[in-house]
């Protein structure tokens, strides 16, 4: 069984795409520094401010996540969703390895019944959005078939969506030695999916189905597939959510119905045996709405340009 939680390419950096559409994830780094600095100065006593890396235990998560949402909007780093090709969107964002101090965020919004897969690592983020209909069920409520689900979810996650080839990336292209989702970069898999509502539960129980997550069978199937194909040291984490109001999930100003990965890293010297060598040290963490789901700290030798 996958681990669950409650209510909740190293040669270049930027957006990885299937074509030539390339943008840098750090477009809005200066504005984030300004926002983060102002937030820290106005909200934290000096003895609680960290000199670098992610701010710990923000006293007002609602404000903090709102700032992250605005940063993500300003930088154009929300995953753009599509309906074609079955309805699964994918994109990969790689951290900038050249900036002395780098801060950014990447997000998925519009989670009001749909499912997201976020695979975050010490080198970047692979994000996807999976429409509820027709991927998980037909409009009349009948469950989708395994064959259709595998072809339009797992196969697209693995190889990209051919109808969005200019932007869509499959995770198989990110598994090489030292690449974003390689074992060295310690990827962690998250599946964010709706809980079963009380109304749905009453209907499903008449069919002998009583599950915590609305699409638990298909989600468990996807978790097992990802576990078998991505070298994560942790089992996939399944995060359930209550369905929010649709309009709130689509804005760029709040955390409602949104998953955001923020990263803060710096170029430093790290110890390797008795020597000090150029390295990268930082942290990333995943938020769902106003809750920190997971945080990971890292350091590794800095890849040298070709």
Image: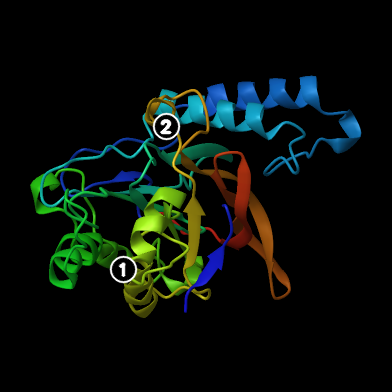
Q: What is the residue that sits farthest to the front in this orientation?
A: 206
Identify the secondary structure beneath mark 1. loop
Q: How is the image coloured?
A: rainbow
Identify the secondary structure beneath mark 2. helix
Circle 1 Cα neighbour tier, 10 Å, few/some/many (<14 / 14–19 / ≥20): few
Percent from the top left, x then y, of residue 60?
Answer: 72, 31
Viewer-side label of 2, 1: 1
Q: 59 and 114: which one is in front?
A: 114
Q: Which residue is mark 2?
A: 249
Circle 2 Cα neighbour tier, 10 Å, few/some/many (<14 / 14–19 / ≥20): many
Residue at (62%, 22%) from the top-left corner?
35
Residue at (47%, 74%) from the top-left corner?
2
Q: What's the mark number on residue 31?
A: none
Q: Are marks 2 and 1 in contact (CB under 8 Å)?
A: no
Q: Which residue is mark 1?
A: 207
Position of residue 111 in the picture relative to residue 87 (left or right): right
Percent from the top left, x then y, of residue 76?
Answer: 36, 29
Toward which corner of the image does residue 205 lie, by quadrant?
bottom left
Toward which corner of the image does residue 113 lie, by quadrant?
top left
């Amino acid at each position: 069984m996958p681990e669950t939680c409650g209510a909740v390419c190293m040669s270049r950096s930027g957006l990885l795409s299937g074509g030539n559409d390339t943008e840098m994830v750090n477009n809005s780094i200066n504005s984030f520094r300004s926002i983060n600095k102002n937030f820290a100065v106005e909200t934290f006593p000096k003895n609680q401010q960290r000199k670098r890396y992610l701010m710990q235990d923000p006293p007002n998560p609602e404000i903090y996540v709102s700032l992250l949402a605005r940063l993500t909007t300003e930088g154009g780093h929300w995953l753009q969703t599509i309906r074609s090709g079955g309805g699964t969107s994918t994109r990969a964002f790689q951290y900038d390895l050249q900036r002395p101090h780098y801060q950014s965020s990447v997000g998925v919004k519009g989670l009001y019944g749909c499912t997201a897969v976020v695979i975050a690592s010490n080198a970047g983020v692979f994000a996807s959005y999976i429409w509820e209909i027709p991927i998980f069920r037909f409009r009349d409520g009948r469950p989708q078939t395994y064959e259709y689900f595998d072809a339009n979810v797992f196969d697209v996650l693995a190889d990209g969506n051919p109808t969005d080839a200019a932007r869509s990336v499959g995770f198989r292209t990110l598994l090489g030695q030292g690449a974003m989702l390689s074992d060295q970069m310690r990827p962690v898999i998250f599946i964010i999916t709706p809980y079963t509502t009380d109304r749905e539960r009453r209907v499903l129980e008449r069919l002998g189905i009583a599950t915590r997550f609305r699409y638990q069978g298909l989600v468990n199937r996807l978790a097992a597939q990802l576990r078998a194909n991505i070298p994560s040291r942790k089992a996939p984490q399944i995060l359930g959510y209550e369905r929010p109001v649709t309009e709130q999930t689509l804005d760029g100003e709040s955390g409602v119905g949104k998953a955001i990965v923020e990263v803060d890293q710096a170029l430093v010297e790290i110890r390797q045996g008795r020597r000090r060598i150029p390295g990268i040290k930082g942290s990333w963490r995943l938020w769902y709405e106003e809750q920190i789901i997971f945080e990971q700290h890292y350091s590794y030798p800095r890849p040298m340009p070709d």
